[in-house]
Amino acid sequence: MSTPVHGASRHWLRLERLRLHLPTPPEALASLLCTVVVALFLLGFVLQPYLIPSESMERTLLVGDFLLVNKQVYAPAGRLTRWLMPYRDVARGEIVVFHHSQPPYLVKRVVGIPGDRLRIADGRVMVNNAPLDEPYAVFEPTARDPFGNDFPATVYTDPNIDPVWWRQMRVLVQNGELVVPQGEYFVLGDNRNFSKDSRFWGFVSREQIVARPLVIYFSLRQPSMTDPGPAALPAADDRLGHGRQLSARLSGFARWERIFRVVH
């Protein structure tokens, strides 16, 4: 008598699984493996997380923001990348992640593209004799830096300026304007008074640019040099990190309003 009952029970379970569309264990395992493969592909070849460590891109990016960046948008335009991924070249006004000689990666905004004639007058960026519309630029109070506010300068006085860049720059200046060579880009931090950028160490080549920020997926409230009061602390450097301390810091206060904010 037990065998018919057992067979009926199995038949009933099969009918219930079909009615509820429940996956079998092999199907569930296959689905999990597909999810893992897709996630690894996205993180390995398309997306990459980074942590903002310094004030150079305030108020667009704050110290403690965790970024997800697109590593394929600026990839070489081969047949495979054109078919699989959207590809385009770097445009003026875009924020880019790039290799740098000291910190492995930096994030800045492109203000000069190949062929541009560029100068900065009293902090205002002029490109091809026209003022650049920069609603993102901020000027946090600090001691006036003649080299950063008026560029290109005629006198080499700032110890932060790369001497190799200084010699190169003098050759590229025409009528008081810096001419951006082919294959090179001039980048600035949005927080102009707290950013060491192309004014101090030169151009970023097309080959150095590796990604474009997409979205802020998390943001921890961390001290900044530009915060008022004694709690302000300097960041270690401008180097992008990978946010390995995120799980250990979740108990701290987060900027919830910045989570999933698209980066412009």
Image (tube, rainbow, N blue to C red):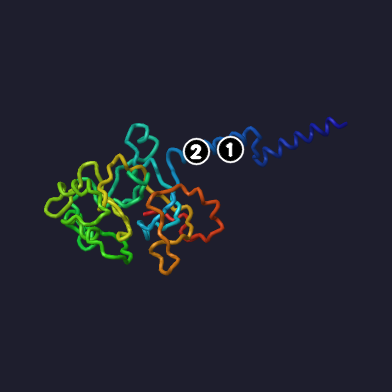
The single residue placed furthest to the bottom in the displayed view is 229
How many circles with numbers are drawn on the protein? Answer: 2
Q: Residue furthest top?
A: 3
Look at the image and tell me in which quarter the N terminus lies.
top right
Q: Classify 199 as above or below 98.
A: below
CB contact under 8 Å: marks 1 and 2: no
Q: Residue at x 48, y 57 (%)?
A: 220
Please say if 119 is above or below 205.
below
Q: Amino acid at mark 2?
A: Leu
Q: Determine whether, in the image, residue 79 is placed left or right of residue 163.
A: right
Which residue, given by chain and number where applicable, does mark 1 sit on?
32
Residue at the location (75% across, 37% down)? 12
Density class for disc 1 (Cα within 10 Å; few <14, some 14-19, many ≥20) is: few
Q: Earlier in the sequence, mark 1 or mark 2?
A: 1
Which percent across, then down, holds residue 179? 17, 48
Q: With respect to residue 66, does 37 lie above or below? A: above
Q: Nearer the viewer, residue 258 or 207?
A: 207
* Quadrant occupied by the C terminus: bottom left
Spot occupied by residue 240 in the image (x, y as percentages of width and height):
40, 49
Left or right: 233 as drawn, with respect to 114: right
What residue is at 32 percent from the left and 62 percent from the top?
138
Secondary-structure class at tag 2: helix
Q: What amino acid does circle 1 point to?
A: Leu
Can you give x and y, in whole percent of width and height, for residue 22 in the image?
65, 39
Q: Residues within 10 Å of mark 2 (few under 14, many from 20)?
A: few
Where residue 248 appears, as percent x and y from the top left, is 55, 52
The CA span between labels 1 and 2 is 12 Å
Which disc, if any, is residue 40? 2
Identified at 78% across, 36% down, the residue is: 9
